[in-house]
Image: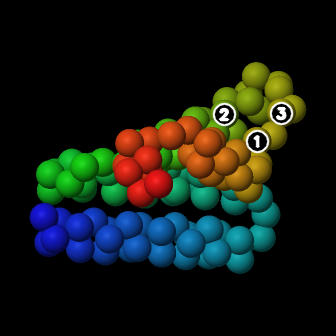
C-alpha cells in the first residue's frame, strides 16, 4: 500500500506540474489561449485518473470533477460563438468556485482526519 501511495503522490505532482507548465506556457503566447488551457487541464486531470484506475489506485472524484468542468468549459468556448452567445467563462473564477465546493462538501477521506 505504501508503494501505491508513493506512486499516487508522484503522479499527482507530475500532473499538477505539467498543468502549471501548460498554463504558464500558453500565457506566453499572444492572444487568448484559455480554450487550449481548458482542454489541456481537463485531459491532464482525466488522464491522471485513468492511470490511477489502471494501476488500481483509488481515483479522486475531485480531480475527475475538475477535469470534466474544464472540458465542458472548453466545449462551451467552441460552441458559444457559433450560437452567437456572448457569455465568456473564465478559468480562475471557476477554479476558485470548484475549490470552495470541494472544501464545503464533506468526504469520508477528509472526515477521518478531523
Report the front residue among 112 and 38: 112
* Residue 9 image position (x, y, % from top left): 32, 71
Which numbered disc, 3 or 2, marks the residue that appears first in the sequence? 2
Q: In which image quadrant can residue 4 be found?
A: bottom left
Q: Is residue 87 left or right of residue 108?
A: right
Give me the residue at 86% from left, 32% from top.
Answer: 86
Whether the residues at callouts 1 and 2 have beta carbons within 8 Å, the answer is: yes
Q: Is residue 64 left or right of residue 11?
A: right
Q: Is residue 41 above or below residue 19?
A: above
Report the front residue among 83 and 73: 73
Residue at the right extreme of this rendering: 86
Q: CA distance from mark 1 to mark 2?
A: 8 Å
Report the front residue among 110 and 43: 110
* Residue 80 image position (x, y, % from top left): 74, 30
* Residue 35 image position (x, y, % from top left): 65, 50
* Residue 101 image position (x, y, % from top left): 63, 42
Mark 1 surroundings: few (<14), some (14-19) or many (≥20) residues within 10 A: some
Mark 2 surroundings: few (<14), some (14-19) or many (≥20) residues within 10 A: some
Whether the residues at callouts 3 and 2 have beta carbons within 8 Å, the answer is: yes
Task: Check disc 2 and report the residue beneath it.
Answer: 76
In the rendered image, is residue 34 in sight?
Answer: yes
Task: Check disc 3 and report the residue beneath it.
Answer: 87
Which numbered disc, 1 or 2, marks the residue that appears first in the sequence? 2
Q: CA distance from mark 3 to mark 2?
A: 9 Å
Q: Is residue 59 left or right of residue 86?
A: left
Give me the residue at 23% from left, 74% from top.
Answer: 6
Task: Check disc 1 and report the residue beneath it.
Answer: 89
Give me the residue at 66% from left, 48% from top.
Answer: 100
* Helix, strand or loop for disc 3: loop
Q: CA distance from mark 1 to mark 3?
A: 7 Å
* Helix, strand or loop for disc 1: loop
Amino acid at each position: 500500500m505504501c508503494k501505491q501511495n508513493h506512486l499516487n503522490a508522484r503522479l499527482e505532482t507530475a500532473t499538477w506540474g505539467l498543468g502549471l507548465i501548460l498554463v504558464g506556457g500558453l500565457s506566453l503566447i499572444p492572444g487568448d489561449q484559455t480554450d487550449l488551457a481548458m482542454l489541456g487541464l481537463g485531459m491532464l486531470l482525466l488522464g491522471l485518473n485513468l492511470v490511477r484506475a489502471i494501476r488500481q489506485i483509488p481515483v479522486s472524484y475531485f480531480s475527475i470533477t475538475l477535469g470534466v468542468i474544464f472540458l465542458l468549459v472548453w466545449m462551451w468556448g467552441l460552441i458559444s460563438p457559433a450560437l452567437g452567445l456572448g457569455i465568456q467563462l473564465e478559468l480562475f473564477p471557476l477554479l476558485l468556485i470548484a475549490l470552495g465546493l470541494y472544501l464545503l462538501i464533506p468526504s469520508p477521506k477528509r472526515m477521518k482526519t478531523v
